[in-house]
Image: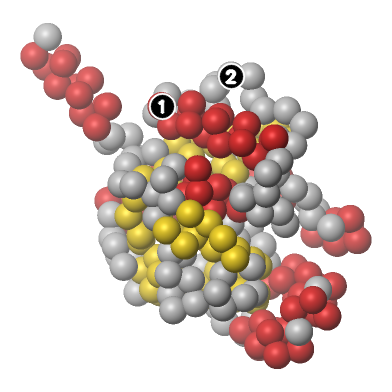
């Protein structure tokens, strides 16, 4: 059966940039369909309403300009939906805001990054090589992704494992069991989009951060590799629940 991904859209691309780059759902659809053209998608604008079922094979939480610790009703409701999805053994992918939300509401903490804004292409060291990474090939020692954030995960949730880290962002990516995979970077964003967004935010970022961000765009990015990792993670069904089911079938 083709994979059906639910996109939990938490925000939209700036209106002035949408004619050129589209919105987050179309970015993710293009990213995944380049690797698996059979995939289907349903987008939920979670600021308005959450899914009323768990029919998708997996769910992805997008980035957002807001903070996960903002006291907004929809953020708490989204965290509760994530809890239900995890309990139902659904696969969860968290991107930027989604990465921080899962950490913050499941025993960890997200907050303002001590080092300030991260923009442009950020490099993280890959410190684990789990089965789903190796399914794609021998993992590289580093991962380059476009980034745009001023918050980050400050404390891991219980049971989480860091697979990507950097001096700038210690928790760049983590997993929780076989259900949750998150990343602080943005595999859906291109360097052209990053340059355009930094241009809009140039005064907010400050000239030093802006110039460093623009210079970093010369790096080669790994969005295709990370997309392959996400798909391998979703398709990795050798979870504890699956093993228990197999064991029961063998001994039942």
Residue 68 versus residue 241: which sits nearer the camera?
68
Residue occupied by mark 1:
87
Where does the image place residue 42, in percent across and percent down from the top left? 67, 31
Residue furthest to the left: 251
Looking at the rendered image, the disc whose residue lies closer to the viewer, 1 or 2, is 1
Identify the residue at horizontal 56%, vertical 60% (top origin): 111
Left or right, 112 with respect to 239, comes to right
Picture quadrant of residue 86: top left
**Secondary structure at numbered mark 2:** loop
Viewer-nearest residue: 79 or 188 = 79
Q: How crowded is mark 1: few (under 14 residues within 10 Å), some or many (20 or more)?
A: few
Furthest residue in direction front, as rendered:
71
Asked whether, in this view, residue 98 is left or right of residue 137, the answer is right
Q: Say if 79 sits above or below 22 in the image.
A: above
Query: Which residue is the site of mark 2?
Result: 53
Q: Which of marks 1 and 2 is nearer the N terminus?
A: 2
Whether residue 73 is situated above or below residue 172 in the rendered picture: above
Task: Look at the image and tell me whether residue 2 can be seen.
Answer: no
59 and 184: which is toward the camera: 184
């Amino acid at each position: 059966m083709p994979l059906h991904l639910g996109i939990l859209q938490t925000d939209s691309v700036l209106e002035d940039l949408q004619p050129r780059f589209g919105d987050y759902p179309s970015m993710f659809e293009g990213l995944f369909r380049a690797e698996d053209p059979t995939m289907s998608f349903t987008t939920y604008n979670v600021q308005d309403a959450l899914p009323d079922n768990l029919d998708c094979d997996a769910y992805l939480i997008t980035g957002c300009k807001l903070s996960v610790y903002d006291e907004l009703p929809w953020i708490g409701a989204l965290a509760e939906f994530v809890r239900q999805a995890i309990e139902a053994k659904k696969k969860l992918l968290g991107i930027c805001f989604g990465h921080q939300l899962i950490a913050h509401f499941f025993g960890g903490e997200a907050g303002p990054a001590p080092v300030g804004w991260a923009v442009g292409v950020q490099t993280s060291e890959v410190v684990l090589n789990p089965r789903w990474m190796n399914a794609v090939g021998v993992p590289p020692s580093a991962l380059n992704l476009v980034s745009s954030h001023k918050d980050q995960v400050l404390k891991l949730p219980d049971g989480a494992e860091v697979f990507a880290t950097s001096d700038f962002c210690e928790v760049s990516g983590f997993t929780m069991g076989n259900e949750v995979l998150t990343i602080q970077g943005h595999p859906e964003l291109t360097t052209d989009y990053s340059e355009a967004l930094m241009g809009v935010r140039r005064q907010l970022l400050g000239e030093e951060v802006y110039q460093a961000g623009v210079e970093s765009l010369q790096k080669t990015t790994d969005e295709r590799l990370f997309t392959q990792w996400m798909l391998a993670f979703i398709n990795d069904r050798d979870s504890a629940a699956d093993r228990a089911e197999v064991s029961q079938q063998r001994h039942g």
